[in-house]
Image: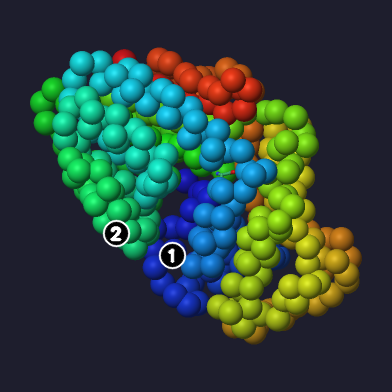
Amino acid sequence: MTTTALPPAAGRVAEPVSAQTALAVRTGLAAQPKRLPPWLFYDHEGSRLFDRITELPEYYLTRTERSILAAHAGAMIAQAAQGSRLRIAELGAGSADKTRLLLAAAIARQGTLDYEPVDVSPSALDAARERIEREIPGVRVCPRVMDYTHGLELEEMHEGERRLVLYIGSSIGNFDPEEAAQLLQGVRAGLRRGDSLLLGVDLVKEDSTLLAAYDDRAGVTAAFNLNLLHRLNRELGADFNLEAFGHRAVWNRAESRIEMHLVSRLSQRVRLAALELDVEFAAGETIHTENSFKYLPGQPETMLTEAGFTPAASWSDPNRWFAVCLGRVD
Ligand code: TRP
């Protein structure tokens, strides 16, 4: 399966000029329209900027999902456990305080917990392990270095245990519908009867609210998007003039997704020395860097059903801006 949201498993390990980066950039900038894969966002500076995005007043996603988890973590854990002992896996290396709400609810119920964060980045997993074992006594962290977009292989469980997989933060929305469907099927294939998946999804809402979340007043999302060009300058010896590109967020209603683009402010040619490549940009031409799909009520349940899960429960905020859905393997 090909994915746009994550590099192949080795992608974030080899620095500075990985073959993956070279190939992705060469292919993306030759395409019409031009595009670059979103995994290029997350160098050191990109990860720092992303953490700041999650704290922006306009970026309602993180705080809305957190409020849902804060209100319902106990019910979510009880629904997933169905009276059994639970083990929790998470796709992505743990989104800190949001994950903590669920881990704490599980600890309150069963005293101790095995927690398996799954990520392609060993350093992100190490950081998560250190933080969580220090902050939540009773949690045993068992990190798994794996590209979960290619299926999920987790450890055998003890008799009578159930597994709950977390995929929160609207990360599923960064995949095209077909890729999202394959990802969920891959997760389903790694689970057994009685296991479940907790999925955090962002819902369609007023255009202005959606757009502001991806184009904040302080310009943090713009800096995050432009940092990608900065990275190409550094790693590929490119000469992108960051003043000559701008950030644009677009609500594509027909596809139900927010798109992030980098817009060339003028007609220009950019040299990427390490690739021995010159790229022409027309004035107003864009590079498409990310999608974030937004769902209508009922769609997350349909996605779960099509991947082989039975929708068991779902929780939302009073505005219905975000939903957290539980799918069970029956
Ligand atoms: N999945 C989240 C979202 O779509 C987080 C995210 C991924 C994001 N890429 C981003 C947020 C780029 C802002 C900008 O919102």
Most extreme residue toward the left, as rendered?
Answer: 159
Residue 202 is left or right of residue 71, and the answer is: right
Q: Earlier in the sequence, mark 2 or mark 1?
A: 1
* Above-or-below relation of 140 to 73: below
The residue lying toward the viewer, choosing from 311 and 219, is 219
Q: Residue at x 44, y 64 (%)?
A: 11
Q: Residues within 10 Å of mark 1 (few under 14, many from 20)?
A: many
- Return the residue at label 2: 126
Q: Residue at x 63, y 78 (%)?
A: 233
Tell me the amino acid under the disc marked 1: Arg
Disc 2 vs disc 1: Cβ atoms closer than 8 Å? no
Mark-to-mark CA distance, 2 and 1 = 15 Å
Q: Quadrant of the C terminus?
A: top left
Q: Which residue is pictured at 52% across the width and 54% down the height?
A: 51
Q: Let me know if residue 26 appears in the view.
A: no
| Residue 160: quadrant of the picture | top left
Which colour assignment does the render follow? rainbow
Q: Is residue 309 above or below residue 143?
A: above
Q: Which image quarter: residue 250?
A: top right
Number of marks in picture: 2
- Residue 12 x, y percent position in the rendering: 43, 65
Residue 265 visible in the displayed image: yes
| Nearest to the observer: residue 220 or residue 167 | 220
Q: Tell me if 284 is positioned left or right of 298 in this view.
A: right
- Amino acid of disc 2: Asp
Q: Position of residue 243 (x, y in %)?
A: 78, 73
- Residue 317 position within the rendered picture, expressed as x and y whole percent measured from the top left: 56, 23
| 107, 264: nearer the viewer | 107
- Point 30% across, 36% down: residue: 103
Residue holding disc 1: 12
Tell me if residue 204 comes above or below residue 57 in the rendering. above
What element does badge 1 sit on?
loop
